[in-house]
Amino acid sequence: MIKITCTSCSKPLTIDETKLPMKEVSFPCPSCKTKLSFDRSKPAEDEGASVAALMDDDDDVGFGKRALIIGVDKPEIRQAVKAAGYSPVHKATAVEGRDYYSQEIPGLVILSPSAPSPPPIDEMVPMTSIMPGDRRRGFFVLVGDNLRTLDGNAAFLYQVNLVVASKDLGSFPKVFDDAYRYHTKLYNAMNDVLT
């Protein structure tokens, strides 16, 4: 089973790709009737790169989008970031990360604290206390051992967009893709109301 999102109404759809031919097929969205296409013969990596294409172009540095990793620099986090289509940049402290973020505005920010703690994580406060307008320009992810992936309550309490358990970093591109699409849909609707 694969998940795709309608390009018009952003409705998530689940498709059993094994029942599709090895060529491009078109079908209407069940909600808005927009014509959607899926090509089973194309490699799955193309789908993972689609989220990177949604991010703002001002993050482009010629070799990919940047992801800012703040705190503990773990190889599995770097690998997850690369698998999602980003080039990792590491800053050891949240103060260094905030300074980098305010200058570069990377599209993805990974918070990797040295020790898990109840919210707020003191060592990450300089990053999580950035003004809301600037925060919305990036997507903040908290990674830790004692977390539950996609826990919306924890994300709210820790002041991030997404929470990912360290054990789930292998599926980070898919988890990030789904969460980022939902985030984009939410903020697009909010921005439409504000304008």
Image (cartoon, rainbow, N blue to C red):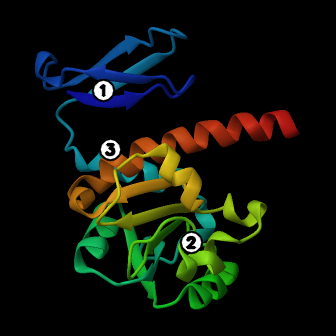
Q: Determine the CA span between mark 2 and mark 1.
A: 30 Å
User: Is residue 63 placed above or below 10 in the rendered structure?
Assistant: below
- Amino acid carrying mark 2 in the image: Pro
Residue 158 sits in quarter: bottom right
> In this view of the protein, which residue sits in the foreground, 74 or 122?
122
- Residue at mark 3: 47
Which labelled disc corresponds to residue 38? 1
Where does residue 57 sit, x and y in percent of width and height?
59, 63
Label whose residue precedes the other's in the sequence (2 or 1): 1
Label whose residue precedes the other's in the sequence (3 or 2): 3
Q: Residues within 10 Å of mark 1 (few under 14, many from 20)?
A: some
Residue situated furthest front in the rendering:
118
Could you tell me which residue is drawn at 54 percent across and 82 percent down?
A: 123
Could you tell me which residue is drawn at 24 percent across and 79 percent down?
A: 75
Which labelled disc corresponds to residue 19? none
Where does residue 127 sit, x and y in percent of width and height?
62, 76
Q: Residues within 10 Å of mark 2 (few under 14, many from 20)?
A: many
Label whose residue precedes the other's in the sequence (3 or 1): 1
- Residue at mark 2: 106
